[in-house]
Image (tube, helix red, strand yellow):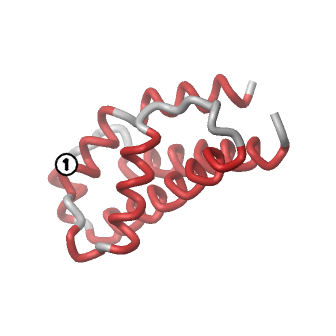
């Protein structure tokens, strides 16, 4: 694996860790919704994750990452359609897809 891909994988891992830190152990949707700063921080991390995934795909499309298309699409929506962001979709991605993605990234970096 080329070093550029490893850098992008590390960026994804770091953004996932940041999202987990922002949300804390409790992971409460109502707290997430109530905090504009937290929502914006999480959205920014998804921008980074989606961009890194897009760059990995361009360098080596054979690297399989769960929900790659959905996360790249969400990144595009966050950047280009900031006024149409669906907090429930972002929350669903956090709950359903990030744990699997975190495990996949960890395995690829080993």
Please name whichever residue, 15 or 51, is drawn nearer the observer in this view of the structure.
51
Q: Is residue 88 above or below residue 63?
A: below
- The tally of labels here is 1
In the image, taking residue 14 as reference, residue 19 lies left or right, namely left
Please name whichever residue, 87 or 59, is drawn nearer the observer in this view of the structure.
59
Q: How crowded is mark 1: few (under 14 residues within 10 Å), some or many (20 or more)?
A: few
Question: In the rendering, at what x and y percent does residue 33 appear?
Answer: 19, 60
Question: In the rendering, at what x and y percent does residue 25 appear?
Answer: 36, 38
Residue 10, image quadrant: top right
| Residue furthest out toward the right | 3
Residue 81, image quadrant: bottom left
Please name whichever residue, 10 or 31, is drawn nearer the observer in this view of the structure.
10
Q: Name the residue under label 1.
A: 29
Question: In the rendering, at what x and y percent does residue 66 appear?
Answer: 46, 31
The quadrant of the image that shows the C terminus is top right
Q: Residue at x 33, y 64 (%)?
A: 77
Label 1 element class: helix
Q: Residue at x 25, y 66 (%)?
A: 35
Residue 73, image quadrant: bottom left
In the image, taking residue 12 as reference, residue 36 lies left or right, namely left
In the image, taking residue 65 as reference, residue 30 lies left or right, namely left
Question: In the rendering, at what x and y percent does residue 48 appear?
Answer: 54, 59
| Residue furthest out toward the left | 30
Please name whichever residue, 65 or 87, is drawn nearer the observer in this view of the structure.
65
Q: Residue at x 25, y 41 (%)?
A: 92
The quadrant of the image that shows the N terminus is top right
In the image, taking residue 11 as reference, residue 49 lies left or right, namely left
């Amino acid at each position: 694996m080329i070093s550029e891909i490893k850098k992008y994988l590390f960026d994804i891992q770091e953004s996932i860790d940041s999202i987990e830190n922002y949300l804390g152990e409790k992971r409460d949707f109502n707290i997430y919704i109530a905090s504009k700063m937290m929502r914006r921080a999480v959205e920014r991390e998804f921008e980074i994750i989606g961009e890194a995934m897009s760059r990995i795909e361009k360098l080596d499309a054979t690297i399989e990452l769960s929900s790659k298309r959905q996360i790249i699409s969400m990144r595009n929506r966050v950047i280009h359609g900031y006024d149409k962001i669906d907090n429930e979709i972002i929350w669903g991605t956090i709950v359903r897809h990030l744990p699997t993605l975190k495990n996949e990234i960890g395995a690829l970096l080993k």
